[in-house]
Image (cartoon, rainbow, N blue to C red):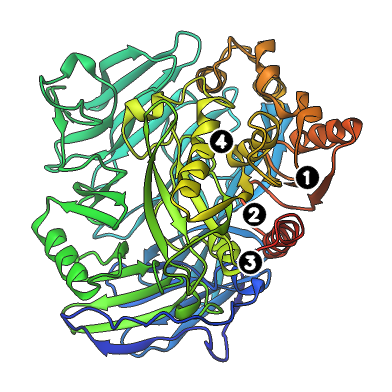
Amino acid sequence: MLRSVVCAGLKAVVLAAALIGVGGLPAVAQVRVEPAPLTAYGSLPSFEMVTMSPSGERLAFITVAGEDRTLVIVDMATKEQLGGAAVGQVKVRNLDWVDEDRVLVTSSTSQAFPNIGIVEQELSTAQIYDIAQRKIIVVFNGTRGVLPFLFSNVRIVDRADGPLVLVRGYAFGNAGRLDLFNIDPATGRGRLEEVMGTRVNGFVLDASGQSVARSEYDPASRVWSLYLKSGSGFRKAWDTVAPLDAPYLVGLGMQGDSVIVGAKRPDLSQPGREDAEYFDVNIETGAWRPVRFDFRPDGLLFHPVTRRMVGARRSTNQGTVYAMADPAANALWSRIEQTFDGRAPNLVGWSNDLQKAVVYTGSDRDPGTYYALDFAAGSLMKVGGAYEGVRPEQVASVRAVEYAAADGLTIQGYLTLPPGIEDPRGLPLVVMPHGGPASHDVRTFDYWAQAIASRGYAVLQPNFRGSTDRGDAFMEAGYGEWGLKMQTDLSDGVRYLAAEGVIDPSRVCIVGASYGGYAALAGVTLDPGVYRCAVSYAGVSDLRRMMTDIARDTGRNDNATLRYWSRFMGADGAGDRSLDQRSPAYLAERADAPILLMHGRDDHVVPIVQSRVMADALRRAGKPHQFIELDGEDHWLSRADSRQRMLNETVRFLERHNPPN
């Protein structure tokens, strides 16, 4: 619960104004220095979720001290604090400006409502902070018949007569519906805006806040349907059978008379061109046309007022690249690139007129910094750093690497080197596979990799097959390869670095979380002789049990979630016993190195039972291991004390079983 406060001073806020230059920011020479304390890396970021008001005249952000979070509002012109609210130890997930005087804070908590079919999971709540009145308003407060939780992202629509705050809520009537509600920002009460029902799984709003497209998914028939606005109702414009990879609505098209749909449409393939991922669908005619960029985008960008698509972005080895179709957006990004030349800027947010922006940088020599820019005034303001306890010279350099897997597939990734090491030779190595596995690492400041590198280790983060950074074919190459080629892609990276003389192959450990935790466990059970130790946070250890637990929790032996995991794991349904052959919990007697297991007790993504069964199997097999359960922690290490302990225990375990010196 928010509690209104006024801070005496913002010591953590730098707010240093300077004229914007065209020559970029000054570089910092890297020299060998003593490493920062682990607390500097393990603490939650000092600054989170820096967001700009519609006019660009105010900033809102979260500061973190220990476990406690505080919402802070600052005036851009005067650099003075306008207000603040003690957020406490809740898990803040998002900040949104309702208007110039109100900020909406979304947080989440673990809840369950078994009587209406909601199993224990992370559910979101929201509160509105009124700056002028120092008042806290709870969303859905006093709304009869509606659960006080959010069942969609909040949509805030700027209108001449005042902002619309729209979100889906669970209404008890008629056996329960997920309808769209209009939240009164003065009281928090919700008023029914549109009846949607439970099958509607996506919608697009126009600039006035009216939905112009909806999508529905029927889990029984596996049919995804697109409905487009027609008069006072909606007409079905297209449908497709989608047991997996269902299409999804993204937003308004560039002209406002169409919607963007993410979909696989091989029937619309063009000879000699890669299939498009996004399509522009005309609302009136239903006609589809591909939306293409010079790169395969990670996501699309939309105008804060018109809500129309204005561009796209993609993470690359050199940082995030943007393609802007809107002239004003393109001018803004061009000036940001010029200002932050060589600093790999990320566009965090912008004002309604696209003349002011918030930018985040985090790469070599930069532990993560937020800046606010005002191009009309010609000013650049450093808001603050995510990891203030890490000095620029203590930031480890990150290099892009590329190597061939055993079957010839090219694997790309990143190698983080200990600070001060320019010509790496014979270093101890930590392999750190990402989670997902349908995800990918990018070149940025990674607190976990940076902390380990600061202790004298090289850290390899491979984007193994199954990762999402290189198109559908590369991701699909990972289907059925859990514990197989997805695993040897990691050890092939070890062999490559050893052949280059960069690392000592006799001094290698593996560390990971979620799928990366599975890969850490599989590394010492399915791919022996490579690693001296393994650290798994929230890793899957029993694939078949993971599948059967999903079936139990959803009440179905056949659903989209199970089909997704069956394809990736290479399973024939939830009860496929062949999964046991690639489950570390069934292979504990093969473990050839000590294992550290850590897991949050409130994890609803990978339940803690996955680490418990692994610990039991290792104990029965007489294998060296340690198991740490983290109270009140979820899948994402949202608590400062948990993150700090995870990092301390990881480094302690590495230094014990694979000393860096």
Q: Is mark 4 in CB contact (under 8 Å) with mark 2?
A: no
Kind of residue at disc 3: Gly
Vertical comparison of 559 with 494: above or below: above
Query: Mark 2 sits on what residue?
Result: 637
Q: Nearer the viewer, mark 1 or mark 3?
A: 1
Kind of residue at disc 2: Leu
Residue 148 appears anywhere in the view: no
| Structural distance between the alpha carbons of marks 3 and 4 | 37 Å
Q: Secondary structure at mark 4?
A: strand
| Structural distance between the alpha carbons of marks 1 and 2 | 23 Å
Q: Residue 435: x, y in percent? A: 54, 41
| Structural distance between the alpha carbons of marks 1 and 3 | 23 Å
Mark 1 or 3 closer to N-term?
A: 3
The residue at the point 26 percent across, 16 percent down is 238
| Structural distance between the alpha carbons of marks 4 and 1 | 47 Å
Mark drawn on residue 42: 3
| Structural distance between the alpha carbons of marks 3 and 2 | 10 Å
Q: Is mark 1 in CB contact (under 8 Å) with mark 2?
A: no
Mark 4 or 1 closer to N-term?
A: 4
The crowd level at tag 4 (other Cα within 10 Å; few <14, some 14-19, many 20+) is: many
Vertical comparison of 297 with 90: above or below: above
Query: Mark 1 sits on what residue?
Result: 594
| Structural distance between the alpha carbons of marks 4 and 2 | 28 Å
Kind of residue at disc 1: Pro
